[in-house]
Image (tube, rainbow, N blue to C red):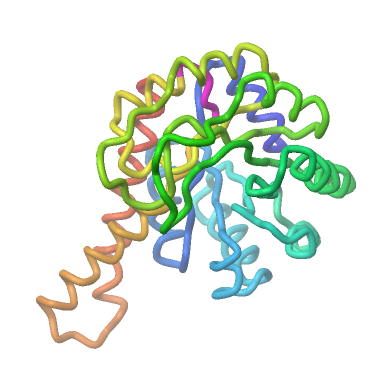
Amino acid sequence: MKLQEWLSELENKESAVLAANFYNFETLSGILQAAEETGSEIILQTSPATIEYLGVNMAVSMAKAALKKYNVQGWLHLDHAESINLIKTCLDAGYDSVMIDASDKSFPENVTITSQVVELAKTYDASVEAELGYVAKLGQSQESIGFTDPYEAKVFHEKTGIHSLAVAIGSAHGFYKEEPKLDLDRLERIHRITDCALVLHGSSGVPDDQLQAGIKKGIRKINLATEIKDTFMKSLQRQLHNSNDIDLRKVFPPATDAVKQLVARKINLIKAA
């Protein structure tokens, strides 16, 4: 099943799917162990930085082999790409879905760039995600500015033909300085007049009740990245602090298990909504 088809099914079910970023074999394994244990579909994501670290062909090979190993229904998604050349490279390599992030451009520029990616992806029958509004990236201000306008979201979808749209409703990438408060009324208005699947970026640190309320108001894809990195590294640091063992095959598994526990909890949270 194509990702765009699964997103349509989720709309009918009024449910969502977790999209988890992986960075190495250990985080990939932890994510898929959680999906296997919960009997859930999963979207595996790589950022451009992860592709630079692993290499695009290695990322695809790892993801496809791991999905088969754990017998999980999943898709490989390119997160936050700004380069059309990188998007084409990933599609050629076997990615199921791509995100073009031109949200820092003007509305007309965003429409033009995104439309080009949609046309490109059609030849691969791949899903396309875009972003509209201001979802703060690492190091940027997290003030409540540039939230997605519902009418603009409707027009943006109609003009571009995207399958999913990341909306700015109060979330941010990275750690929050204070507890976020999602603009659920705005989300509901966007969902009411926009036909594509809505995506929540920056879910790390968003309270559970707000995540579940977001699903009820129209979120169909929830991105998780920062908490995965943080959970893995804190667990690994504890292992290294308490052990002089040089065998990485012994110090990595507890960190992988910590990722599994985190992702399983998020998946169950989504299911409970």
The image quadrant that residue 9 belongs to is top right
Could one spot residue 125 in this view of the protein? no
Could one spot residue 151 in this view of the protein? yes
The image quadrant that residue 129 belongs to is top right
* 122, 217: nearer the viewer: 217
* 180, 72: nearer the viewer: 180
Q: In the image, residue 28 lies at what x, y percent?
A: 46, 59
Question: Does 219 lie within the magenta span?
Answer: yes
| Residue sitting at x 27%, y 84% | 247
* 66, 22: nearer the viewer: 22
Q: In the image, residue 107 lies at what x, y percent?
A: 73, 38
* 9, 86: nearer the viewer: 86
Question: Does 59 lie within the magenta span?
Answer: no
| Residue sitting at x 16%, y 69% | 238
Q: Quadrant of the N terminus?
A: top right
Give the residues in magenta.
216-220
Using the image, determine if residue 184 lies above or below residue 148.
above
Could you tell whether 24 is left or right of 116 in the image? left
Could you tell whether 134 is left or right of 6 in the image? left
